[in-house]
Image (cartoon, rainbow, N blue to C red):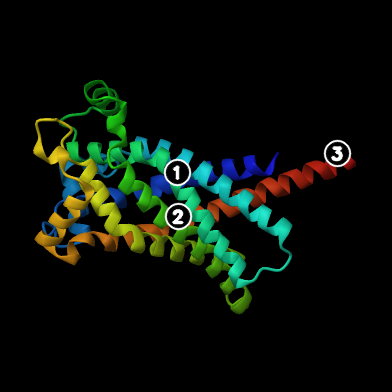
Amino acid sequence: MCEFMKDVSAGALTGVIGTVVGHPLDVIKLRLQGEPGVYRSILGCGYAIFREANVRGLFRGLIPPMVNLTLLNSLAFGLYGNFKKLMSDRMSNYVASSKLQYFVMGCGVGFVTSLVSTPSEFLKVKMQHSSGKIYNGSLDALIKISKQHGMSALYTGYTINTIREMMFSTTYFGVYELSKASLMSQLGNIFNAQCAILLSGGISGMLGWAVSYPLDVIKNLKQSQSLEKSQVSNKVSALALSRERLSKFGVAGFYYGIQISLVRAFIVSSVRFSVYESAVHMWNAFEQNLLNSVKI
């Protein structure tokens, strides 16, 4: 199997598992962002959602991110894996400056993946704000919105989401590679490979969300606006929304719900990188065993 397909299949697996693990926390995060100060705690918000719609409420809008993150992780980790191979082929000894290329690669990955993530993020936001009163499901939301407002409506908030994705991916992949290398080289007697992957994945996810979270808040506000032309809010830009948020809630308004996002990011990113590295390792072992059996 070609190297690219290994990374693509491993990325797809990370998308499925990571989405299922992290979606309930994402639902809580979106509710905390949209209703600042209403809930006293993360658990209180989660319980309120559960009381409204049982377990189903915590998984509302799951299908769009499931599809999106399967495609997105396939693409992102496919590019990521091939970039690593390209670097290893050209450089026998890594130095700190060369690893900065991972940050550049992450930025490029974010730019490309925003083409996939924007429509899915938009549908997810619409589903989670509808509470089941407007749309009967993700497909129903896609059909109704496309029919009433055109396909271009699915790219509401594209610019702000692209910047968010670029900031996140730059941090995500760059920090993962640097932290994993550091843990393995300096603390190898404490952290074995799997522990280093889990911890590095969690750290990279937390830092990625920490730097991009304010943009995520604005992106969600932009995508949650009414699509009706008669609504004044439809004409509000991301910059205007930022100013309004700042004047109403101060700087803290850009960080409502960040605690749950950081917890979610650590858990999901640890799982993603662990699944990815394990899947690639299994593919390589399978290929090696297949070659050995052919030689025999």
Instruction: State the image coordinates of residue 268 (x, y, percent, origin top left).
Output: 42, 55
Query: Mark 3 and mark 1: span between their CA atoms?
Result: 39 Å
Instruction: State the image coordinates of residue 237 (x, y, percent, origin top left).
Output: 20, 46
Identify the image quadrant of residue 115. top left
Neighbor class of circle 3 (other Cα within 10 Å; few <14, some 14-19, many 20+) is few
The residue identified by callout 3 is 294
| Disc on the earlier residue, 1 or 2 | 1
Neighbor class of circle 2 (other Cα within 10 Å; few <14, some 14-19, many 20+) is many
Task: Please say if 156 is above or below 179.
Answer: above
**Quarter holding the C terminus?**
top right
Task: Please say if 53 is above or below 170.
Answer: above
Query: Mark 3 and mark 2: span between their CA atoms?
Result: 41 Å
**Quarter holding the N terminus?**
top right
The label shown at residue 169 is 2
| Disc on the earlier residue, 3 or 1 | 1
Amino acid on which the number 3 mark rests in the picture:
Val
The residue identified by callout 1 is 113
Q: Secondary structure at mark 2?
A: helix
Amino acid on which the number 2 mark rests in the picture:
Ser
